[in-house]
Amino acid sequence: MFKRYKEVYELILENASEQEVVTALSDVLELPIEINTGENINRSGTISLPVYNGQNAPRYIVVNGSDLNDDAAVLIESVAALLGRRTALNVGKSADADKSNQMKVSVAVSSLSMAELVAVKHLLDELNGKEGVVVASEIADKLNISRSSVASALEKLCAAQVIQKFSLGRKGTFIRVTIPQLVEEISKFAPKNI
């Protein structure tokens, strides 16, 4: 039975879902095991081990049955700990990515001149903060700023990797906002009366 325990650990390392890991664990141990939020655990005749991730309410690996040998108990405990740690690491990576994105946005916005800031604010308003086609010369004429200010702003944002832009020739430029925090950051610093 325990010759296949590595299958369970490999699933954890491969970032398989908790359900897939628990299903494999159930198969390896030949026991009825499920993952549960703890809201509807039948406490009689079950053994439940918490999966803590350090932030959210714990989930539980629930074994239907009240008799586990030591080897099975150790395997289930280690799987619960590893699943919790994996989730905590993924939450940490997500937070790091958010911080990195915010840093990119802050650096990009701080590099813009006032004319560029006004141009970007207007562009983002036209795109509703997402993506679309704009004609830079029309925006420059409408805002009474130089076309080079609009082009320079787009280049800076593209270099900072907060937008993507693709020339469509005479039809304009396709712009996609790749980091949504850009819209909020521009709103903080751009003049309100444009």
Image: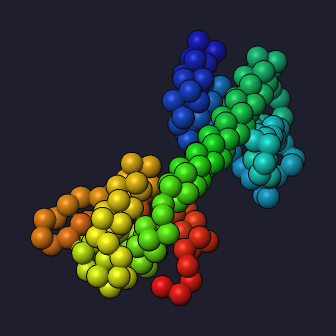
- Front residue of this view, candidates 4 and 57: 57
User: With 23 as the anchor, is 85 left or right in this view?
Assistant: right
Residue 182 in the figure: left or right of residue 70: left
- Tell me, yes or no, if residue 75 can be seen here: yes
> Residue at the location (31% across, 77% down)?
140
Tally of numbered tags: 0
Residue 117 in the image, given as x and y percentages of width and height: 48, 69
Q: In the visual, does 125 lie left or right of 61? A: left
Coloring applied to the structure: rainbow
The one of 123 and 9 positioned closer to us in this rendering: 123
Give the percent coordinates (x, y) of residue 93.
62, 40
Residue at 29 percent across and 58 percent down: it is: 165
Q: Quadrant of residue 52?
A: top right
Residue 123's image quarter? bottom left
Which residue is pictured at 28% across the width and 70% down the height? 147
Q: Where residue 163 appears, x then y in whole percent?
A: 39, 57
In the displayed orientation, state which residue is furthest to the right. 44
Query: Given the current orientation, which residue lies at the most extreme left position?
Result: 170
> Where on the picture, by quarter, is residue 6?
top right
> If the image is split into quadrants, where does the N terminus sit?
top right
- Is residue 177 toward the left or the right of residue 151 in the image? right
Residue 145 vertical placement versus 77 (above, below): below
Relative vertical location of residue 134 with respect to residue 57 in this rendering, above or below: below
Q: Is residue 127 visible?
A: no
Q: Nearer the viewer, residue 79 or 34?
A: 79
Q: Residue at x 75, y 41 (%)?
A: 53
